[in-house]
Image: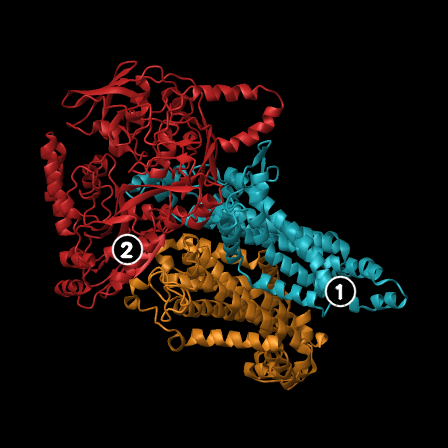
Chain colours: A orange, B red, C cyan
């Protein structure tokens, strides 16, 4: 398992996940980062998008959540550099007169919230089950890994679409609007936990046999203590790499579900919903409604993927 | 009222387009001859098929091939290529003979229909009075969505080509009602065990869901639900056709841009559900033309007017029961902006639920309050909701032109007067059952009165609900007002046409004054087609295939 | 060998059984069938009568056994929305999806493998960087957005390609319909197949490149080069052959993901396959169809996995030793 070897250079007892992060950010990795313009640029883009999503009020020209502030005379206003455009709506206006740039930023907020929450949840489930399987072994391991095998049978996209579709049918339309966000987070999280569980299990099995764990056992530390104070921090590095790559997958999943109408309602527009709505105007000449949110989505996913790729290589000693 | 309206189309030598009516027979004969020319004919056929195939694109598929199961315009339109009613409409929407050549009222409640001679069903069986009796009785089944047209009728067969239809009460609209009942063959239907209309939710497959046998010009060649249905021309059709298009392909394409792209790229010849925003683009495209007409369909919003604590409203009591609140909503809607931006000018604003040219329509009722959010806020405060309230608006997203966009715009507009609206947009397959269960507090509706007469709208949308009598079946606002019921009944039973119209006008004025619904606009219906196609648009969005020509 | 085989088949059966339980619960409890048939105004007595008629008053276990029995016979009930047997609808739609997925997969292999080999052999050159960069965009591009742009350019702007449906299809003996025999069918296939394969091309290309680089670092390749064999012969005879084993395995598994992504592609291009049917059924809450789709797709995936497992077992001798020693695969 590649993850196990990636964990190898940090096999020193550490405490807490923060320390693990610090481990990932060892000085040589930082030096690597500074030397790679592509990685640096992609990290910059990701951070920029995240900051914009975290503080939309500071970045977005308009607060698009306040529907009463919309002006219908701005509906379908072209981007600023085209005839009829205005710099108050730099990327143009949508069918409600909403500023597209602001809509993208607020949409980004929802998209990132859903995908980060989904990744966090699948990480939580995956790490917990992976630790259990790796540390306890035996029946636990057999059950968890068989379930993982079953789950792996189905591609993430299909799991998310099936889960969301079935829940949607079960809840009925009215209730679904209320639960759209949690249902989506759950759908995407369920689609992704297996990867973490398998990685963590493999790494844990290696760690559990390590000398320091044996030493801890000898001095009478409890299993739980050993698990969380010693083993967990040392197996987290591959998980962070995986989480970065999974974030890109989650963002695409969210957008795709929203686009096919299984996602968020039009009153809570995520990037995927913006593209779905804009799609209706693609042929009537108002291309900016769909194209700009689409580009934002593409740039974000590309940046996350580039950074994830680089991170994987940087933390994989075999490729150094 | 003896029915022999001028047969504008069938006897006329020229169509509106000025094109001479082709006899059709010679061309068909020529094609058949060419088929006999041997092996080469097979390859020719593949090439010829596209030249003489009309490919139609629409938003949704016909739900069934059973003509009495689903009262939705798309289904009705598609089935009208296969099945035919006794009475039809000409291009001025006047009644015209179809399977009946004449009809007259023999007493207050009895109508005598003389049937057309020599008409056969596609399977060769002759069309007779028995078929009429059978069909009308079949349409009265609970699983029929057409029972509203035929409730209480009795049919007496006089001879093979004459039937008497007896109405429970004097009913001047009987021929109009029967224009919605396509005739099925008794023997064929019985032989295939389809005695009742297909119940779309029952556990049994109905033969008629996928098979059809009518007197109309086309027969069902193949059907893949939601994907493609193919119809071919009958050689022995009794009536006249403007053209003799050999094959019709009906393609449901749910995605608006994909459907329009298909027309632009030449994969479709005619699109009958054109989103307003695509019209300008299509008009500017070479080789494509637009036909439009003011549709009989009015778009309006309705609200729960019955429950004291509506399910999807967060407010003290039921605000919608207060006239001021409904007025406030009407004042808060900028109809001009919706018509201009969302509908791209392809709509005319209104303040009543009945479109022009319908009996009962009064131009004065069209006068909608000017957009005035301040006045709306005052009205809300007067009603006891100075800070507004929250509710959920149910809305279809694939039924009316730009339905979801209109709803989103409404949400935006209402937010300005402090109403916090959650939009719940869904496909029609979920929307209408939800409304039918009255599981809604606020909803969008588009209504098209079927026989150019406002009575159907009054009966079905404003009377207290009584399913057996077909009354109030669409009153999704659950309004129940015995006084209004009585007024509508008296108008319905009035035999003097002028008096009846006056009564209806009065009732529609009252509905407008009381703001029982908040009307927005009347749709303009747009068909887009290749230059080589001529497809006149009927204002009830009924694509009359017998009028369509293609070069 | 037998133990391994039985283990895998047993596991597959457990998966199918679990999915059937899920599908049954959905079928039984999602949307009240009584209400759906009788309508909201039905009386309690009417419902009791129908409940007995439909066998809904029996114990759940018996109902489930009945459900399994009917499912095994291919009886999935009637679609609420279409009023026709679910099995027939699925059979009608399956050829469209299978043709699209197969074309997409072939395209992905035909482009992805050569591109990956090129990128590995010309490591560090401009062409290789370009291929990698393009592949990253391919992985990052949501397929629906790709489809929209393709339609916009090739159908609307240029008018070259078909934007919806399968074109003219030929019926082969009533069991299969194909779009591959007509010009319009082939034309209609181009854009959906490209949209579907872009992600796979990128995946396979990166995989081939990584595997190839790995193999080329191996000692025996170095020895072969040291022995003076031409690089062409080394690459083709040694490196590529060893690279392709994992690639083919992954390609098998990717076939599953192609079917999954087909849902999106079918929606964008209104391709009348199973994926579009699934989305339409979700919109209409057509529970019998959803349940059947769930079972069908699971069986399909289980079969693919089983096949891949067995192929892997046959190819890789180490795995055999591992299984024999009781280790985890």
Residue drawn 31% across the image and 60% down it: B422
Numbered circle sitting on residue B338? 2
Residue at disc 2, secondary structure? helix
Task: Please state which of residues B282 and C143 is positioned toward the viewer in this rendering.
Answer: B282
Name the secondary structure under disc 1: helix
- Check chain identity for marks 1 and 2: say if they share one: no
Q: How many marks?
A: 2
Residue density around tag 1, few if under 14, some if 14–19, many if 20 or more, within 10 Å: some
Check the image and report above or below for A6 versus B185.
below
Place of residue B198 in the rendered image (x, y in percent of width and height, measured from the top left): 38, 33
In-image side of B85 versus C215 (left or right): left
- Give the chain letter at badge 2: B
x and y, in percent, of residue A163 in the image: 48, 56
Q: Quadrant of the C terminus of chain B?
A: top left
Q: Dot 1 corresponds to which residue?
A: C121
Q: Nearest the camera: C200 or B134?
A: C200
Q: Is residue B490 visible?
A: yes
Whole-percent x and y of residue B68?
A: 34, 32
Q: Nearer the viewer, residue C65 or C252?
A: C252
What is the spatial separation of the Cα atoms under label 1 and label 2, in whole angstroms?
60 Å
Chain of residue at mark 1: C
Q: Is residue B80 left or right of residue A42?
A: left
For the residue carrying disc 2, how many other residues have a C-alpha within 10 Å: few (<14), some (14-19), or many (20+)?
many
A61 w.r.t. B362: above or below: below
Indicate the quadrant containing the N terminus of chain B: top left, top right, bottom left or bottom right: top left
């Amino acid at each position: 398992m590649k993850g196990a070897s990636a964990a190898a250079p940090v096999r020193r007892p550490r405490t807490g996940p923060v320390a693990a992060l610090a481990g990932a950010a060892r000085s040589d990795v930082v030096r690597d980062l500074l030397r790679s313009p592509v990685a640096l640029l992609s990290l910059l883009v990701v951070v920029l998008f995240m900051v914009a999503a975290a503080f939309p009020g500071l970045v977005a020209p308009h607060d698009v959540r306040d529907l009463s502030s919309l002006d219908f005379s701005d509906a379908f206003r072209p981007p600023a550099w085209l005839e009829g455009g205005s710099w108050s709506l730099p990327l143009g206006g949508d069918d409600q007169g909403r500023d597209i740039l602001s809509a993208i930023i607020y949409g980004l907020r929802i998209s990132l919230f859903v995908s980060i929450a989904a990744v966090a949840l699948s990480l939580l489930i995956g790490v917990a089950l992976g630790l259990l399987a790796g540390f306890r072994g035996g029946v636990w391991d057999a059950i968890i890994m068989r379930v993982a095998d079953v789950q792996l049978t189905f591609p993430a996209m299909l799991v998310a679409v099936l889960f969301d579709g079935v829940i949607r049918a079960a809840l009925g339309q009215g209730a679904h609007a209320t639960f759209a966000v949690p249902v989506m987070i759950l759908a995407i999280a369920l689609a992704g936990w297996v990867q973490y569980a398998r990685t963590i299990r493999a790494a844990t099995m290696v760690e559990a046999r390590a000398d320091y764990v044996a030493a801890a056992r000898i001095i009478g530390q409890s299993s739980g203590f050993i698990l969380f104070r010693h083993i967990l921090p040392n197996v987290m590095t591959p998980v962070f790499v995986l989480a970065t790559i999974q974030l890109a997958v989650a963002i695409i999943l969210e957008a795709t579900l929203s686009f096919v109408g299984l996602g968020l309602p039009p009153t809570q527009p995520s990037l995927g919903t913006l593209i779905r709505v804009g799609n209706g105007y693609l042929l009537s000449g108002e291309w900016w409604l769909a194209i700009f949110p689409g580009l934002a989505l593409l740039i974000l996913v590309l940046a996350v993927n580039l950074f994830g790729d680089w991170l994987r290589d940087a933390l994989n000693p075999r490729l150094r | 009222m003896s029915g022999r309206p001028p047969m504008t189309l069938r006897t006329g030598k020229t169509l509106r387009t000025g094109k001479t009516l082709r006899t059709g027979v010679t061309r068909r004969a020529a094609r058949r001859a060419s088929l006999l020319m041997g092996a080469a004919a097979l390859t020719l056929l593949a090439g010829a098929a596209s030249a003489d195939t009309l490919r139609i694109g629409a938003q949704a598929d016909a739900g069934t091939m059973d003509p009495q199961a689903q009262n939705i315009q798309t289904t009705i339109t598609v089935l009208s290529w296969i099945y035919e009613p006794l009475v039809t409409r000409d291009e001025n929407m006047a009644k015209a003979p179809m399977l009946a050549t004449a009809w007259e009222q023999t007493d207050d409640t009895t109508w005598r229909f003389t049937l057309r001679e020599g008409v056969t069903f596609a399977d060769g069986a002759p069309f007779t009075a028995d078929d009429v009796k059978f069909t009308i009785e079949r349409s009265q089944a609970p699983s029929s969505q057409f029972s509203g047209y035929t409730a209480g009728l009795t049919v007496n067969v006089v001879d093979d080509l004459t039937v008497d239809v007896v109405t429970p009460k004097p009913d001047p609209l009987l021929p109009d009602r029967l224009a919605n009942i396509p005739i099925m063959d008794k023997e064929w239907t019985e032989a295939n065990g389809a005695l009742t209309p297909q119940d779309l939710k029952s556990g049994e497959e109905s033969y008629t869901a996928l098979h059809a046998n009518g007197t109309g010009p086309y027969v069902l060649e193949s059907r893949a639900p939601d994907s493609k249905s193919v119809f071919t021309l009958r050689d022995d059709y009794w009536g006249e056709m403007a053209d003799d298009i050999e094959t019709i392909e009906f393609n449901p394409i749910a995605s608006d841009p994909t459907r329009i792209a298909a027309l632009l790229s030449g994969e479709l010849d005619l699109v009958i559900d054109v989103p307003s925003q695509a019209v300008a683009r299509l008009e500017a495209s070479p080789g494509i033309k637009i036909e439009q007409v003011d549709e009989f369909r009015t778009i309006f919003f309705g609200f729960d007017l019955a429950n004291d604590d509506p399910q999807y409203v967060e407010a003290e009591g039921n605000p919608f029961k207060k006239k001021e609140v409904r007025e406030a909503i009407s004042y808060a809607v900028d109809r001009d902006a919706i018509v201009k931006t969302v509908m791209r000018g392809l709509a005319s604003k209104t303040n009543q639920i009945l479109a022009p040219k319908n009996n009962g329509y009064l131009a004065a009722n069209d006068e909608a309050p000017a957009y005035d959010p301040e006045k709306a806020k005052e009205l809300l405060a007067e009603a006891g909701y100075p800070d507004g309230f929250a509710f959920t608006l149910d809305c279809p997203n694939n039924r009316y032109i730009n339905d979801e966009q209109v709803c989103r715009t409404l949400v935006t507009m209402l937010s300005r007067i402090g109403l916090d609206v959650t939009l719940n947009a869904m496909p029609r397959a979920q929307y209408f059952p939800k409304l039918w269960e009255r599981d809604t507090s606020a909803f969008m509706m588009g209504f098209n009165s079927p026989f150019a007469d406002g009575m159907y709208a009054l009966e079905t949308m404003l009377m207290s609900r009584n399913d057996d009598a077909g009354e109030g079946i669409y009153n999704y606002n659950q309004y129940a007002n015995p006084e209004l019921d009585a007024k509508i009944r008296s108008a319905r039973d009035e035999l003097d046409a002028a008096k009846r119209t006056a009564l209806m006008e009065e009732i529609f004025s009252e509905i407008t004054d009381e703001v029982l619904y908040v009307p927005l606009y009347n749709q303009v219906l747009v068909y887009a087609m290749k230059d080589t196609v001529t497809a006149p648009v009927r204002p009830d969005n009924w694509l009359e295939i017998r009028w369509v020509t293609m070069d | 060998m037998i133990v391994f085989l039985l283990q895998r088949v047993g596991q597959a059966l457990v998966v199918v059984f679990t999915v059937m339980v899920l599908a049954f619960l959905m079928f039984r409890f999602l949307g009240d069938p009584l209400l759906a048939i009788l309508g909201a105004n039905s009386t309690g007595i009417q419902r009791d009568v129908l409940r007995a008629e439909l066998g809904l008053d029996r114990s759940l276990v018996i109902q489930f056994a009945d459900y399994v029995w009917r499912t095994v016979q291919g009886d999935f009930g009637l679609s609420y929305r279409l009023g026709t047997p679910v099995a027939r609808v699925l059979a009608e739609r399956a050829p469209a999806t299978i043709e699209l997925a197969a074309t997409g997969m072939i395209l992905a292999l035909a482009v992805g493998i050569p591109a990956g080999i090129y990128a590995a052999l010309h490591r560090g050159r401009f062409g290789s960087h370009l291929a990698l960069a393009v592949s990253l965009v391919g992985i990052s591009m949501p397929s629906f957005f790709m489809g929209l742009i393709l339609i916009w350019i090739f159908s609307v702007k240029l008018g070259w390609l078909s934007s919806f449906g399968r074109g003219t299809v030929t019926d082969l003996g009533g069991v299969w319909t194909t779009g591959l025999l007509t010009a319009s069918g082939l034309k209609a296939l181009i854009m959906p197949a490209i949209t579907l394969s872009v992600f796979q091309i990128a995946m396979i290309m990166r995989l081939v490149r990584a595997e190839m680089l790995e193999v080329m670092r191996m000692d025996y390749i170095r020895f072969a080069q040291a022995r003076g064999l031409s690089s062409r012969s080394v690459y083709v005879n040694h490196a590529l052959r060893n690279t392709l084993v994992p690639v083919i395995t992954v390609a098998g598994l990717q076939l599953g993901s192609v079917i999954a992504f087909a849902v999106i592609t079918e929606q964008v291009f209104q391709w009348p396959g199973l994926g579009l049917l699934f989305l339409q059924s979700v919109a209409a809450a057509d529970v019998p169809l959803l349940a059947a789709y769930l079972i069908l797709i699971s069986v399909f995936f289980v079969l693919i996995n089983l096949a891949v497992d067995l192929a892997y077992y046959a190819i890789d001798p180490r795995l055999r030793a591992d299984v024999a020693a009781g280790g985890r695969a």
